[in-house]
Image (cartoon, rainbow, N blue to C red):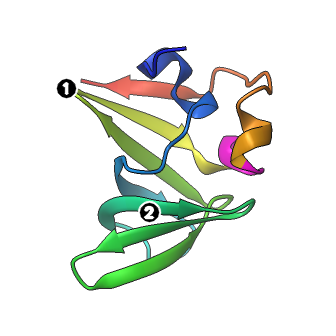
Amino acid sequence: MVRKPENLPRHELIGLDVSIPKSADKNFEGLKGRLVDETKKTFTVLTEEGTKMVPKKTNEFVFELENTKVKVDGRLLVGRPEERVGKKLPGKWSYIR
């Protein structure tokens, strides 16, 4: 399956550029970098200041895919990456062109 905006939450996300426009923790708002690791409940983002471990559940993420940005509620991404690939997800993500 090709990684497209329509199916992004069900794909491998490591290596994508990511930003956090909205967060329950104001320390994470505005964070930008490259996703370098993923666990069940967190992402590790490589920023200019170093790596930051970011919880999935309390953040909104914007992933950059070629010329398209895709906004995803972090609650949809909670779970192991290998489990998320086969899981049916509700349509709670959107494109930002």
| Residue farthest to the bottom, as pictured | 49
Does residue 27 appear in the picture of this structure? no
Q: Nearer the viewer, residue 60 or 49?
A: 49
* Residue 75 shown left or right of residue 11 in the figure: right
Does residue 81 appear in the picture of this structure? yes
Q: SS at mark 1?
A: loop
Is residue 77 within the magenta segment? yes
* Residue 33 shown left or right of residue 35 in the figure: left
| Picture quadrant of residue 62 | top left
- Residue 3 vs 49, above or below: the answer is above
Please report the residue visible at 68 percent of the width from the left and 63 percent of the height from the top: 39
Rendered location of residue 1, percent (x, y)? 55, 14
Q: Which of 77 and 84 is in front in this view?
A: 84
Crowd rating for badge 2 (residues with CA inside 10 Å; few <14, some 14–19, many 20+): some
What amino acid is found at the position of numbered circle 2 in the picture? Val
Identify residue for label 2: 36
Identify residue for label 1: 67
Which of labels 1 and 2 is toward the front?
2
Rendered location of residue 93, percent (x, y)? 54, 29
Q: How far apart are marks 1 and 2 (CA)?
A: 21 Å
Q: Nearer the viewer, residue 25 or 63?
A: 63
Q: SS at mark 2?
A: strand
What amino acid is found at the position of numbered circle 1 in the picture? Asn
| Picture quadrant of residue 89 | top right
In the picture, which quadrant includes the C terminus?
A: top left
Sequence order check, earlier mark of 1 and 2: 2
For the image, the number of numbered tags is 2
- Residue 53 vs 75, above or below: the answer is below
- Residue 84 vs 3, above or below: the answer is below
Rendered location of residue 21, percent (x, y)? 37, 55
Rendered location of residue 76, percent (x, y)? 69, 40
Image: magenta residue range: 76-80
